[in-house]
Image (cartoon, rainbow, N blue to C red):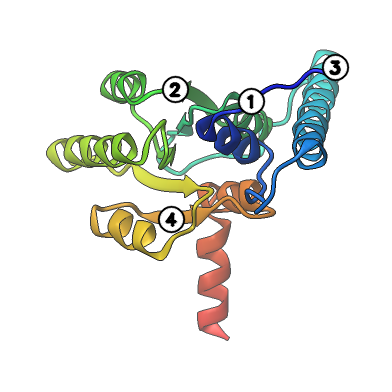
Amino acid sequence: MISVELSEATIKKLFKMASSEIPSTIGDFEVSNALDKIGKTISSLTASAVADTKKSMGQNAQVHFSPEAGNNNILIVDDIGVVTYQLKVLFEKHGFSVETAKDIYTAVNHFKKNCFSYIIMDLFVSTEREGFILLDEVKKIINRDGLDTKVIVITASGKAEHKLKCLNKGADKFMSKEQGWQEEILSICMGKEEEESEEESEV
């Protein structure tokens, strides 16, 4: 049997990639389950991407999203590759153009060169401190240039103080990485959440 010691940072990243809470006790079983979840997610997304590619090669691809302002560009910032891959596949499937970044410097550089309708950023990229720096920097550019870019902060933490701080700094939405969070973000960016809210207010 091979024994491997994992650092606290590695454990946090592992369970973050698996979209799971860190268990109170961690052993072979818990680590194996987390790896299985990650593997299934990658396999599912890869199969979906391959199927979409085959379909588009056989017939004209159908674009489901047509933004009013003509800007369907989205910037996704997360240091976990499986997260950016998940969201990139999901959004491109619905006609969005997606740029990704794994660190705050690449993210700011992308934002300075391109116009994005949404920035979806992980708060811990790769630390909480850097996440807040990124949020401050993009909001500074948005306010300075009068942009209509919306900022959605995502995190596996979900702490109330993190949400309050992000909203106070100008984030338009704060979302925990709970089950179904990817589809919820897609609904927001496609304007479905606003449509549902308007329908409820009319009733």
Disc 2 secondary structure class: strand
Q: Which mark is residue 54?
A: 3
Mark 2, mark 1: which one is toward the viewer? 1
Q: Earlier in the sequence, mark 2 or mark 1?
A: 1
Cα distance, mark 2 to mark 1? Answer: 29 Å
Q: Earlier in the sequence, mark 1 or mark 3?
A: 1
The amino acid type found where label 4 is placed reads Phe
Q: Earlier in the sequence, mark 4 or mark 2?
A: 2
Position of the C terminus, as image quadrant, is bottom right
Cα distance, mark 1 to mark 3? Answer: 43 Å
Toward the left, the furthest residue is 144
Residue position marked by numbered label 4 in the rendering: 174
The amino acid type found where label 3 is placed reads Lys
Residue position marked by numbered label 2 in the rendering: 101
Q: Earlier in the sequence, mark 3 or mark 2?
A: 3
Give neighbour class at mark 2: few <14, some 14-19, many 20+ (Cα, 10 Å).
many
**Residue 61 x/y as whole percent:** 74, 24
**Residue 72 x/y as whole percent:** 48, 34
Left or right: 39 with respect to 99?
right
Q: Which mark is residue 5?
A: 1
Which residue sits at x=64%, y=40%?
15
Disc 3 secondary structure class: helix
Cα distance, mark 4 to mark 1? Answer: 34 Å
Cβ atoms under marks 1 and 3 closer than 8 Å = no
- Judging depth in this view, the residue of 54 and 137 nearest the camera is 137
Mark 4, mark 3: which one is toward the viewer? 4
